[in-house]
Image (spheres, rainbow, N blue to C red):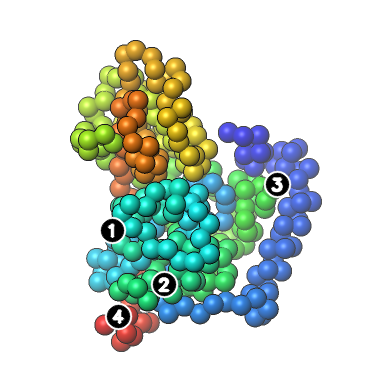
Amino acid sequence: MSRIEQAWRARSLLAVILLPLSWFYRTVTALRRVAFQRGWFAVRAVPLPVVVVGNLSVGGTGKTPLCGYLVKVFQNAGWRPGIVSRGYGGERRELPHLIVNDNTPEQVGDEPLMLFEQTCVPVCVCVKRALAVEHLAAHTDVNIVFSDDGLQHLAMPRVAEIVVVDGRRGLGNGWLLPAGPLREPVSRLPKADIIAVQASDELHISLQVKALKSSADAIENNHFQLTLNEAIALCNGERRSLQSFSGQDIVAVAGIGHPERFFDALRAVGLVVTGIAKPDHHVYTAADFSTDEFTAEPARPVLVTSKDAVKLKALGTLPVSVFEITTTVSASESLRECINALERSLSQAYIGKAFQE
């Protein structure tokens, strides 16, 4: 964990020093929102309903897996979902690009490619997400769009917002960047249609959130968690249970927003894990597997997240045996009901429209 991330966990001296910059950031953010609300900045109309899945804080909260979960829920209800994304980590695309099977993470970003592989629905990347929505409408049979991130992308209209919070880290010290981890103030939470919390053994709810009664209630009840399923060998697709690694020394590698959550989940099922954390969206090379952890004898299995796996597959032959750990999103009854209520509301609002025929 970097020094600045440590500072964000409390109102430390470093955070206090950065507070004037945070006030400036807050002012700019507020003025920008007012500019969109009053029409000084254009909001581009889109032909499909858009549900944004985003977060207030920087770093991993679990929004991308939850986005994939929402796609499946709406599919089961009869919708034809698509996904839009900025494509962070890929090529900067000013024009929309529909992901295809031979795209690489370097071209379209690791998270959009992972969602494409996992959901098998159309995924379009573009820095101007409204253009991506238009592209889906023109070139696919999609009738609802989920935006992976984009809560602060105000140029794209939306019919609903789902804000995802990390239950372990909460909202940090409650301050905006760079004094804290927040992109927007905590007061933004009650404006969300759904607040979804990636569950943790101990929920860290800041005093600021507790003061917002409706948001605190949602954090207490609207939980989801990522349940580890099985291991898939990247070299040949062999599937193994996690229990088959019991008694072995395992190396786990994660280039995600919060690597320790992955390592802890593996330990929770009884595995002996040496965790190697990489930066979020890390670009892997063969050199990443040349250190002592990987070259020592006997060779140890390497376990990675699905987000890391899409990048490692593009490397071709690896010098070690690497397994992708698949996961399933498990939502609490309260969160499931909120999502189902949103689906029913949107179905009623758009019934009879061309894209609902």
Label 4 neighbour load within 10 Å: few <14, some 14-19, many 20+ = some
Q: In the figure, 239 relative to 150: above or below? A: above
Whole-Å distance between the Cαs marked 3 and 1?
40 Å
Mark 4 lies on residue: 356
Quarter assignment of residue 229: top left
Which numbered tag is attached to residue 179? 3
Residue 237, horizontal then vertical, whole percent: 22, 38
Q: Earlier in the sequence, mark 1 or mark 4?
A: 1
Which numbered tag is attached to residue 135? 2
Label 2 neighbour load within 10 Å: few <14, some 14-19, many 20+ = many
Q: In the figure, 98 relative to 274: above or below? A: below
Whole-Å distance between the Cαs marked 1 and 2?
17 Å
One can see residue 51 in this view: yes
One can see residue 331 in this view: no
Q: Earlier in the sequence, mark 1 or mark 2?
A: 1
Label 4, secondary structure: give it.
helix
Q: Amino acid at mark 4?
A: Gln
Q: Earlier in the sequence, mark 2 or mark 3?
A: 2
Q: Nearer the viewer, residue 336 or 323?
A: 323
The residue positioned 38% from the left and 71% from the top of the image is: 136
